[in-house]
Image (cartoon, rainbow, N blue to C red):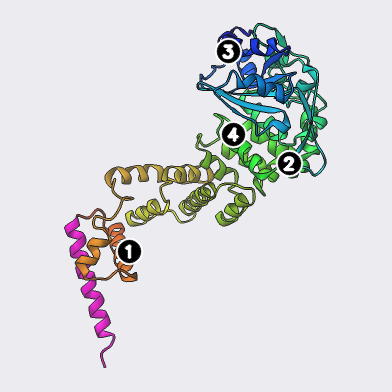
Amino acid sequence: MSLDRLAPVREETRELAQWFAARGHRIFLVGGVVRDAMLGLPLDAAFDLDFTTDAQPPAVKSILEGWADTLWAQGERFGTVGARRGDRRIEITTHRTERYQPGSRKPEVAFADVMEADLSRRDFTVNAMAVELPDGDLVDPFGGAADLADRRLRTPLDPAATFSDDPLRMLRAARFLAQFELSIDRPLVAAMSAMADRLGIVAGERIRDELDRLLALPDPTSGFALLFETGLAERVLGPVGDGVAAVARLGRVGDDPTVRLAVLLAEAGTPADVRAALAERRATTATGRAVFAVLTAARRAIEQPPRTLPELRRWVVDARGLVAQSVEVASALGDAGALAADVRSLTEAEPDLCGPPVIDGGEVMALLGLDPGPDVGTAVEELRRHRLDTGPLTAEQARVHLLEWQRSQTSEHTSGHKV
């Protein structure tokens, strides 16, 4: 594995490294860019750059004030100073160690004098590598390069110590396993199983964000299999039922995160139960609603499959813009029959099905002589019902139907009051 692909980054940061050297300090490139360069992965031009240095934060700020276009120091008490130059964002962190005390969500940070101490606090050996700038060699005290070559996931220190310092790293282990197609050390798996409860100190938003990253991978199945094996899945997703079956369902669907989440949670109770569990775990309102709608439509498709054209139209409309996802989830959960083909034929034949009515509320009021109020909603709903029963309508057909419907309503109301 070669660092040749870092040549453009070295050149881009040469001046910055020289500014640090002129003040008697060393600066190292760390993080995913080093790992990805060694793996031969493409380096997006917009990636952020992370550095570590032996300079204390006041010295880092002093150097950056003469080099950067913009500077921010909200993370200074944790040793991190951020900056932007041109389109490039960077973060520079003083060599440090950090530890979470039992029950605490905030790390205790101590600055370190040597690079190796800083690297030892990182999550995995494949991330515990650094390159000294501008022209230095790879610093790899924990064998990260060899682990990359062997596709092996290990922690720099004992996994219990690494996970105790930041329990979110257990979820990151699942993501790295799937993202880079790694094998995992069994002591690491054992530590995850033993320390699953420790995840309780991590803020729900951090867990949610890590879960979202796993769901967005091209193939997250091995990561979720690890979460189920270690008991972490229930702490991340709630009561999910049979983990083996959940992973099998996950393998039958595509890459839509909503679909993936829905099939993982399909045995967690009713769609309302699932939405409540997601809310408890800090999922966004939009995510909860989407998963609820997809599971509701999918279960209805299996338990009460639409057998007539009006029923199929109603099923499509009730899926609330998540038709493709609902079909995919239904097919993963059970026998959805010809649902996918039927829906495709219907939406091709009636592209306006989920669109607005051919006449709007204002036209309805003018046509029927109504004032704003619930009667307008009743009329619009009648027009919707008629459209679903009979198929596409022209504006003139809609007007004729509403006038006939109004006359029938008036007739019924009059006959109902005869003495």
* CA distance for labels 4 and 1: 41 Å
Type of amino acid under label 1: Glu
What is the quadrant of residue 327 in the picture? top left
Q: State if disc 3 and disc 1 touch (CB < 8 Å).
A: no
Q: Position of residue 244 (x, y in %)?
A: 66, 39
Residue for point 32% across, 54% down = 309
Type of amino acid under label 4: Arg
Q: Nearer the viewer, mark 4 or mark 2?
A: 4
Type of amino acid under label 2: Gly
Q: Earlier in the sequence, mark 4 or mark 1?
A: 4
* CA distance for labels 2 and 1: 48 Å
Q: State if disc 2 and disc 4 touch (CB < 8 Å).
A: no
Q: Position of residue 238 (x, y in %)?
A: 66, 48
Residue segment shown in magenta: 395-419
The residue carrying mark 3 is 9
Q: Decide: is 68 above or below 265.
A: above
Q: Earlier in the sequence, mark 2 or mark 1?
A: 2
Q: Nearer the viewer, mark 4 or mark 3?
A: 3
Q: Position of residue 407 (x, y in %)?
A: 21, 74
Helix, strand or loop at mark 4: helix
* CA distance for labels 1 and 3: 61 Å
Q: Quadrant of the C terminus?
A: bottom left
What is the quadrant of residue 57 in the picture? top right
Q: Decide: is 85 above or below 200.
A: above
Q: State if disc 1 and disc 2 touch (CB < 8 Å).
A: no
